[in-house]
Image (tube, rainbow, N blue to C red):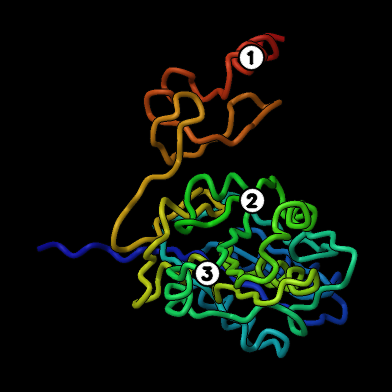
Amino acid sequence: MKTQPQPAYAVLLYYKFVKLQDAEQFAHEHLEYCKALGIKGRILIADEGINGTLSGTIEQTEQYIKTMHAIPEFKDMVFKIDEVEEHAFKKLFVRYKQELVTFRYDQPLDPNKLSGERLSPEKFHNFIQRDDVIILDGRNDYEYDIGHFRNAIRPDVESFREFPEWIRDNMQEHKDKPILTYCTGGIRCEKLSGFLLNEGFQEVYQLDGGIVTYGKDPVAQGKLFDGKCYVFDERISVPINQTEHVVVGKCFHCGTEAEYYRNCVNDLCHLQHIVCDECEQTHHGFCSSECSEEYSVTSQK
């Protein structure tokens, strides 16, 4: 029996809320370091810490982890690791930003001082089976559409910064109920759960490590997560549930079950939409006939 070759690459997902003295300078130096190492990905650095996802060879990613753990501010930073066959990114971006996740809340939120109680994957699995809890997806609507925890509330938001207004308009009746929040890797829930507590929600929890950690947990095994988890790299989505696979995505064109996301071919649109195999061929990657016609006109100029 032939053994399968070991994947040559890895994807790292990580974040750390920690005060950085000169974040802009660190971002500049970190960019040069990442270039020299040869990794690719998207790394955001702010005064409040770091948030990154990157890919590289096993050797490169192991060296990156070793280097980061040698920096006092990041000595205990947790890395979520996926082994893959090739790079999950095409380019490298290392940028300084005002916030690690753009929330635009009018009050300061420091997860080291205020955030929801962290639940291990096993405890979260037990909690989501209770009848008295509210499960709130802390991601964008298009992420929910391809996969989510069973019975979770779908947020009607296209970006994370829309959450404060949406919660004020839609969640007030749940202030006295236990609220369970979750997101891809955990970082958005650090801010979201703190916001909920600031807004007067009494009992707020967050899935420690996010969906990707839940999917790898030997006890939880990704149970009760239907569909796939949207990820911000070339893979687009990854499986989570180790015990059953339930397709929840619907084709943008015909409404049949599907879970392939693609960007509209029209450069002026690039709408990300779920499409089935048949409609992918029929519509040639366009989200609408208008986009197809517009593309034909502009490409002839």
Q: Position of residue 33 (x, y in %)?
A: 69, 70
Q: Is residue 54 visible?
A: no
Would you name the residue on which mark 3 appears?
A: 132
Q: In the image, which disc is placed on residue 155?
A: 2
Quarter of the view holding residue 204: bottom right
Q: Position of residue 283 (x, y in %)?
A: 48, 19
Would you name the residue on which mark 1 appears?
A: 290
Could you tell me how far apart the alpha carbons at marks 2 and 1 are, in whole angstroms?
Answer: 28 Å
**First in sequence: mark 2 vs mark 1:** 2
**Secondary structure of the residue carrying numbered label 3:** loop
Type of residue at label 1?
A: Glu
Residue mark closest to the camera, 2 vs 3: 3
Of 266 and 58, the residue lying toward us:
266
The extreme left residue here reads 1
Type of residue at label 2?
A: Pro
Q: Residue at x 46, y 31 (%)?
A: 251
Q: Is residue 262 visible?
A: yes
| 262 over 63 or under it: above or below | above
Q: Position of residue 217 (x, y in %)?
A: 39, 75
